[in-house]
Image (cartoon, rainbow, N blue to C red):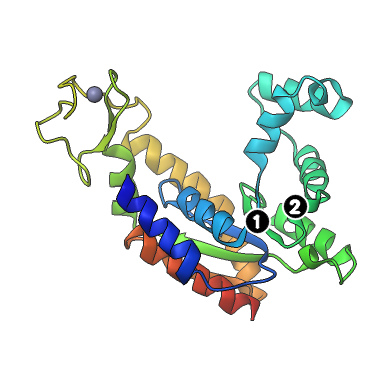
Amino acid sequence: MPVAATQETALTEHAAPHLAMPGPILLLGAPGAGKGTQSKVLMSAWEIPQISTGDILRGLRNDPEKSVTPLGQQVCTAMDSGKLVSDALVEQLVLDRLAQQDTARGYVLDGFPRTLAQATWLDAQLAQQRPQVSSSLPVIAVMVQVSYTTLMRRTTGRRTCPSCSRGYNVFFQPPKNDSLCDVDATELVQRPDDTEAVFAERLRTYDSLTTPVVEHYRALGRFAEVDGGQAMDVVTHRVMDAIVRLRS
Ligand SMILES: [Zn+2]
């Protein structure tokens, strides 16, 4: 959409606060909180990469050279059998990724640290690095907070056109005509796991893992919360302001 593109350009070029060393930034947010969108804006505004454990695992599995290394084979075996990849493996992969040059000024963490144990581990690793390495700044965490009702509607309201793949949301972006696609009048479909029961379960799992991580960073004075129920660009400004504040 041209409008969204213009807003994003304006934000990155004029409104993004300058931050020479963003350091490691952990963005937190429940499923549907819009964390992915915010992460992309931070990456482009401050020219830092995203370190996503999901991306690393998928990348390793799809790389013909890396997938045959002992580490790669362990990851493939775990993923193929539908098991969670062990903490030790994930930590090794994160360390390898953080050793790459593009992380020097900072990075956005996605999907890691997911547990208190991983958060403590990462803090210790970063503290061990030489102080003059900018990326050894401590992790700061920003939570994009969205109400249960909004999250639930964002998820359970999702519909897709099976013919042209256009997406809708019956609460926020409904089709003009009942349950038919605006473009080709095909009956819209809902993904079978976009139900409130599945959503509530995912949220419970997310909360039980995330709460100790939040408390960890809060106790260290490295945590901020942002109201994610507002317009996308408003949320972006709040997230950036929070990061600048935590880094000052
Ligand atoms: Zn369609």
Q: Circle 1 sits in a helix, a strand or a loop, which is it?
A: loop
From the image, which quarter does the C terminus lie in?
bottom right
**What residue is rendered at 11% in x and 36% in y?**
176
Graded by Cα atoms within 10 Å as few (under 14), some (14 to 19) or many (20 or more), the crowding at tag 1 reads many
Q: Which residue is mark 1?
A: 48
**Residue type highlighted by circle 1:** Ile
**Residue type highlighted by circle 2:** Asp
Q: Is mark 1 within 8 Å of ligand 1?
A: no
Q: Circle 2 sits in a helix, a strand or a loop, which is it?
A: helix
The answer to whether residue 147 is above or below residue 238 is: above
Q: Which corner quadrant of the image does residue 26 belong to? A: bottom right
Please state the horizontal and vertical placement of residue 158, each as a whole percent of the image. 29, 36
Real-space Cα distance between discs 1 and 2?
Answer: 7 Å
- Classify residue 86 as left or right of residue 203: right
Please state the horizontal and vertical placement of residue 109, each as a whole percent of the image. 64, 53
Q: Quick one: label 1 or label 2, which is nearer the N terminus?
A: 1
Q: Which residue is mark 2?
A: 102
